Amino acid sequence: MDTDLSNYRKSYEKEELLENNISDNPMELFQKWFFEVDTNFHEEETNAMTISTMGLDGYPKNRVVLLKRYTYEGFIFYTNYNSEKGKAIEQNPNVCISFFWNSAERQIIIKGKAEKIAENLSDGYFESRPRGSQLGSMISNQSEVIKNRDVLETELSKAEKKFEGKEIPRPGFWGGYIVKPIEIEFWQGRPNRLHDRIRYKLEDDYDWKIDRLSP
Ligand SMILES: Cc1cc2nc3c(=O)[nH]c(=O)nc-3n(C[C@H](O)[C@H](O)[C@H](O)COP(=O)(O)O)c2cc1C
């Protein structure tokens, strides 16, 4: 197969990212961009982000997860701690997250360290989920090989019966991670491929150094 995509071309012209219009703290710029993309550009799943981990096999691996909260400290998502990504993080907590918001011609790339959040925070989020999602995460050994789809349906029916009329407890293997950033790059597409790239780098654990990068 040989499919030529060289005519796929788009000029990025919607926005700009200039030094005189940014905050000293990247989380504030993140919040501004997130709000604009969500509200003004109507991105479909603004909180979908790609997270890459260094795998036990030595290969990096990306996958999409949903950002469920962010604070000055970092970015929180939920998953199965025994999944492939969970095992990768256990061995090497250095991860990279990225957002591509096509609607606003924006990309954000975050390097940071992932750590498990406090159990009570995971409990709180788990309780807020619909029952179907709670049961789904309980019966799925995420990333394990299974024989067929029936395995899942059967386990779900069993769990539905078991917990009928009862509260569903959060399984210990499921919970949140917070990714604490050490570097955040904001990329805004511009005409003639002369895009704006502003990078914040954490220095001495609290100071953010701001640089413009060549596109
Ligand atoms: C839009 C979208 C949202 C997703 N959100 C999550 C999520 O929040 N948590 C999660 O564990 N997996 C989520 N997934 C599934 C992951 O991409 C991935 O398949 C799963 O976490 C298993 O990854 P692993 O085997 O590399 O650990 C999402 C997938 C998509 C496409």
Image (cartoon, rainbow, N blue to C red):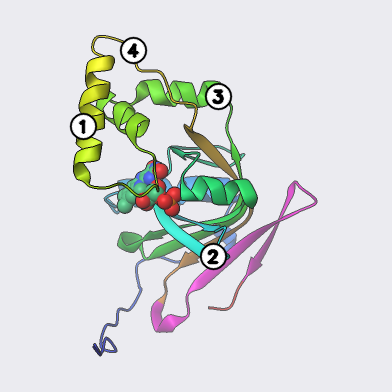
In the rendered image of this protein, does residue 65 appear above or below residue 184? above
Residue holding disc 1: 154
Cα separation, mark 1 vs mark 4, equals: 20 Å
In which quadrant of the rendered view does residue 118 lie?
A: top right
Q: Position of residue 6 (x, y in %)?
A: 29, 89
Front position among marks 1 and 3: 1
Q: Nearer the viewer, residue 205 or 188?
A: 205
Q: Residue 123 at what x, y percent from top left?
A: 47, 22
Q: Circle 3 is placed at which residue position?
A: 119
Q: Earlier in the sequence, mark 2 or mark 1?
A: 2
Indicate which disc, 1 or 3, sits on the residue closer to the N terminus. Answer: 3
Q: Amino acid at mark 1?
A: Thr
The alpha-carbon separation of the residues under discs 3 and 4 comes to 17 Å
Whether label 2 touches label 1, CB < 8 Å: no
Please identify, in this view, whether the residue under mark 2 or under mark 1 is nearer the observer: 1
- Amino acid, disc 4: Glu
Q: Which residue bears the numbered disc 2?
A: 18
**Which one is earlier in the sequence, the residue at label 3 or at label 4?**
3
Counting residues from the start of the chain, the first of labels 1 and 4 encountered is 1
Residue 36, x across and y down, in percent = 38, 50
Mark 2 to mark 3 CA distance (whole Å): 40 Å
Mark 2 residue crowding within 10 angstroms, few (<14) / some (14–19) / many (20+): few
Between 45 and 132, the one lying in front of the other is 132
| Residue pointed to by mark 4 | 167
Q: Secondary structure at mark 4?
A: loop
* 181 sits left or right of 175 in the view: right
